[in-house]
Every structure is written in C-alpha cells, then in structure tokens.
Amino acid sequence: MRTLYAELNKRFPLGELTVQREDLGFITVEREHLRALLLHLRDLEGFTHLVLLTAVDWMEEGIFQLTYLLSDRKKRRDLGLRVMIARDGASMETVHDVWPTAATYQRELCEMFGIDFPDSPGVHDPFILEGWTDIPPYRREFDTKKYADETFTHRAGRETNDPAEYMKKQLYPDGA
C-alpha cells in the first residue's frame, strides 16, 4: 500500500494514508480530485470493482465522510478513498458513470443521510423508506427512541433490559 500511495501521490495531491493490513489501505482525498483518482485507479492500477460506497456522520465536525472501497482482484488488494464533505447541503458528484453500481449506493446515502448526488439516476426516488417524512434516519441527530415511542404502540409484556446486567443474570442465575 505504501508503494502505491507514493506513486499516486506523485500524480494527485493526497491526504493521509492509513494502512489496515498489507492488502488494505485508506487514503483521504479532496473531493475535487476524486473522479480523476477513481478513473486512474480503475483504468491503470487494476481497481476494477467498487465494493462499497458508505458514509459516516461526523456531526460534531459538521462533515460527512464518504468512503469508496475499491478492489483489485488480480493483485488481491483493496483501497478505500475517504472524502470529507460538509453536512449542510451535503452534495457530491455522482460516479455512476464510472461504476454503475454506485447509483444504488448513492440512492441509499441520499435517503438515509440526506446526501445528494445530482445527476445520479433515480437518486430522489423512494428506495427503502417509502412515505418517510422525518429527517434522514442515519443522521446522528435522528432520535430513534423518540421516533419509535411516537410511531409504535407499546406491547404488553415487553421489557427493556440493560444488556450487561441481563447477560450476567443469564450466565450466572444464582448470582455467583
């Protein structure tokens, strides 16, 4: 990974490299360099498969982290590209023309995080949450418990347990 990073860094202004294993690394890249880097990796470096496109909500910092995970099957290595974008009015250029499967990931990220991918096919069509009217549920400010309490009725006999205490009672019923 370090050799690939050094070679790529000659062509593209790259950010931090994190090596997870010899065959898995993550590189931070500015959004304006992502498309050119993706095309280079696909066409010249053998990263022909988009494994995953996902997001992390760094609410306190006011950003989303998009991670594009690519695979080079011949050399058995994977590379993640991290791109930071602002949470407010979150939008990112589509890459469905580079990898058609990206359109599905982009639809999910639009619906679940509220990240727009203009010009991505069907990005604003209902996908998972038909009829959803609340804020995107994967945003960290979404209150899952409040939503459940307001949306679903309480079922008699249902109880909530602290997982650690519950498992302690299950494993040690005599209190040993």
Image: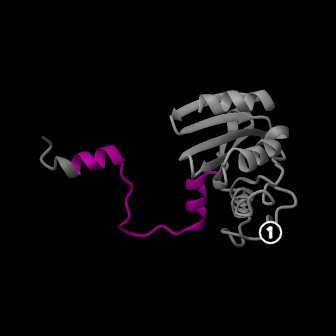
Residue 13 visible here: no
Q: Is residue 99 above or below residue 45?
A: below
Q: Amino acid at mark 1?
A: Gly
Q: What residue lies at 66% left-to-right and 49% top-to-bottom? A: 47
Between 24 and 41, the one nearer to me in the picture = 41
Instruction: Say which residue label 1 marks.
Output: 122
**Residues in magenta, as a range:** 142-169
Residue 69 visible here: yes
Where residue 156 sits in the image (x, y, percent)?
Answer: 39, 69
Taking the image as shown, residue 5 lies to the left or right of residue 148, namely: right
Does the segment drawn in magenta span residue 151? yes
Q: What residue lies at 80% left-to-right and 31% top-to-bottom? A: 11
Q: Quadrant of residue 67?
A: top right
Taking the image as shown, residue 98 lies to the left or right of residue 27, namely: right
Q: What residue lies at 76% left-to-right and 54% top-to-bottom? A: 114
Taking the image as shown, residue 74 lies to the left or right of residue 12, namely: left
Between 65 and 146, the one nearer to me in the picture = 65
Between 43 and 13, the one nearer to me in the picture = 43
Q: What residue lies at 52% left-to-right and 34% top-to-bottom? A: 20
In terms of secondary structure, where does tag 1 sit? loop
